[in-house]
Image (cartoon, rainbow, N blue to C red):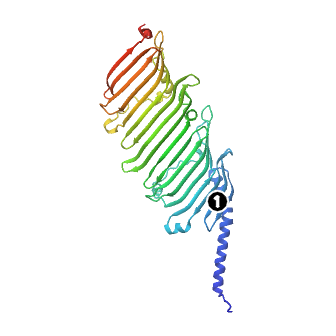
Amino acid sequence: MKKIIVSTKLRIAIWSVAGALLLYSLLGFLILPAVLSKKVPELVQEKLHRVMKIDEIQFNPFSMDLDIRGLEIQNIDTSIFASFDRLYTNIDVLQSIFDLSLKMDQIVLEYPYISVKRDKQGDFNFTDLLSDEQPTAEEKKAEGDVFPVTISRIAIIKGKLSWEDTLYSNVQREDIHSLTVNIDNFTTKGGKHSQLGFSLKFASGGQFDWRGQLKLKPLESSGHIKLDKINLHHLWELFLRENFNFDIQKGTELIEADYHFTDTAEGVQLVINKASLDVSNFLLTEKGKTEPLISVPDYRVSGISVNLLKKSIEIADISVNDAQFKAWLNSDGNINYQSLFGKDVEEKQAPEQAPEVDKKNAGQWQISVKKLALNNFALHFVDKTLQTPSDLKLTSLNLSATDITNKPGAELPFYLDLTLNDKGSIKIKGNTVLEPLSSNIQLDVAETAIKDFQPYFD
């Protein structure tokens, strides 16, 4: 048996490679995680004036797996600003080298949390982190040149966002939970689509769901969105309560639609199809009062189509059932609804010499409604401008119309019938042209008491 003789040079080469691998392993498995765990929180403290904590960082220098666990960033008041349980990333080094791009197998973020707060001065808990510096022309040009990146899977698992607003007298809070994102085959390369899934739930009720495709170059997206069982009372409390003089006591909303969004040479194009809007049990009162002014148990709009570039809106059907309204004309000649919805009218009034709008060049939207049905409406109206207030009750009000459009000269056939003060009846049938305004109607009035209009005679 022959003895294998290893030359000195080969022995040195083997030991050199082994030593390099050992050093590389030590750097990747031990030294790099330790340095990141120490230096990153120090850098965050120095640059952002925030305390950061990291439980553990693991890195595999051979598979290029990065695993960060238990990260937490605090607000200046030491409350939690952002955190997550785990962030895992994996880079496909060989494929990245062959394709001259960044190729990642996956990015997975588990249980992320963000807290957004606004104080009484209107500042957010991240306002001090925002930069006032504007990007230079060179930086903008560099941003336009996107480096090719491909990520097989991006996932956010059970995220949560907490909102707290103390700007107004009543502190408002809302939590978004079960936030889930799944993106398959994400890429910045032109001509390729990514599959997108996004969903979340609101603590006050309702959820949002988005399923579709996304392409970055050129920008294009299509899919289906659904906003279900949104609590209108809580939505009003969060964003509208301080701006108007009414209260939305209750109501739920459902919105869903198919969409297609593209960035074309003519401009941004948005096409919406098969859209619908349902509002149930809507109830509106004066601020601080309980008596309902507007009650709409059932409001539905279906078959909505929108084309942004063509400036067209088509609606197949609008139906409203059993709505009730209470209105009065105050002694100053203003209807009560003006004070409800017009708190900021003076601030929003147009200047005395407003520029004239060029209607020919502005481009008018074309709107059409195939069918409109208002069923079993009721209106209680009091005229307080008279010496003796007039009290009129319109009940069993039904209005139906078809082929409604704002095209000049188009006829609008309609039928209206109602009961006046529980006894009299009024029926109106005919055609109306909206532009220029004209009507051709048949009027039928029966058993209407003259005494109901005595305050006007007086």
Q: Residue furthest top?
A: 458
Q: Residue furthest left?
A: 409
Look at the image and tell me in which quarter the C terminus lies: top left
Q: Percent from the top left, x then y, of residue 315?
A: 40, 36
Up-down: is 188 above or below 75? below
Amino acid under disc 1: Asp
Report helix, strand or loop for mark 1: strand
Residue visible at 48% across and 37% down?
Answer: 277
Q: Residue furthest bottom?
A: 1
Please give the count of numbered marks on the rendered protein. Answer: 1
Residue 166 quadrant: top right
Residue toward you, 434 or 102:
434
Residue toward you, 120 or 207:
207
Please name the residue that numbered disc 1 is placed on.
Answer: 67
Q: Percent from the top left, x then y, of residue 31?
A: 68, 65
In this view of the protein, can residue 360 be seen by the observer? yes
Residue toward you, 329 or 325:
325
Q: Percent from the top left, x then y, of residue 392?
A: 46, 15
Up-down: is 188 above or below 252? below
Apparent side of residue 379 relative to residue 91 in the rendered image (left or right): left
Up-down: is 134 above or below 411? below
Residue visible at 57% across and 59% down?
Answer: 106
Q: Percent from the top left, x then y, of residue 431?
A: 33, 26
Look at the image and tell me in which quarter the N terminus lies: bottom right
- Circle 1 packing at 10 Å, graded few (<14), some (14-19), many (20+), is some
Up-down: is 110 above or below 435? below
In this view of the protein, can residue 38 be seen by the observer? no
Residue visible at 52% across and 41% down?
Answer: 227
